[in-house]
Image (cartoon, helix red, strand yellow):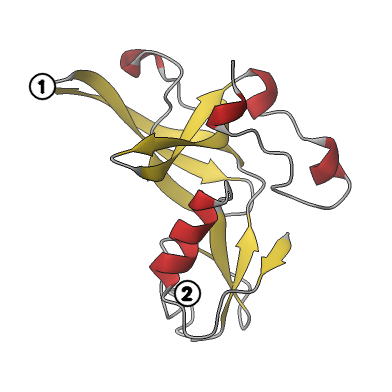
Amino acid sequence: MTEVTPPAGAAPEAVFRDGLTAGELRFQRCDKCAAAVFQPRVLCPACGSDELGWERSSGRGTVYSTTAVRGREGMHNVSLIDLDEGFRMMSRVDDVDADQVVIGTRVGFTTVEQDGAPVAVFRTGGRHVQQSAAARDGRPGAGVPQDKELS
């Protein structure tokens, strides 16, 4: 993983959001017990340490669980994604129909704009789940495609 050095005193949620703005999926790792930590927080949920460092995720993971939700604007999915670095996050898989997301599918991170702010979403197949050359060279997260690059 590539370490991220946030400004001194930056709130954990702000560091995460700044990462999304930069097209990065950031998570914390405990310096004491090495647990991968997500949602951003000030204490490790595994050991209680306040020594949490920031890393960039490769953005690749697997659908752990999913459900299709009906709303006023149609159906969407809510999915739990197990990231390769060892943390789980709630998001959505946005390139397939809501009721077609399959548990166990490999997915890749990207961002989309929602209400003027970047939001983490995942996509199946293609270049979104392929390991980039930069990641193979030891720079995880580098070269992870962003929504604006899609055509």
In this view, the residue farthest toward the right is 137
Q: Residue at x 64, y 74 (%)?
A: 5
Which residue lies under the disc numbered 2? 46
| Kind of residue indicated by mark 1 | Arg
Q: Nearer the viewer, residue 35 or 4?
A: 4
Does residue 63 appear left or right of residue 151 in this picture?
Answer: left
Which residue lies under the disc numbered 1? 72
SS type, badge 2: loop
Q: Is residue 56 above or below residue 45?
A: above
Q: Splitting the image into 4 quarters, where does residue 144 fall?
A: top right
In this view, the residue farthest toward the front is 116
Dot 2, crowdedness within 10 Å: few (<14), some or many (≥20)?
few
Q: Residue at x 49, y 60 (%)?
A: 18
Q: How many marks?
A: 2
| N-terminal-most mark, 1 or 2 | 2
Residue 13 position, x and y percent, is 40, 66
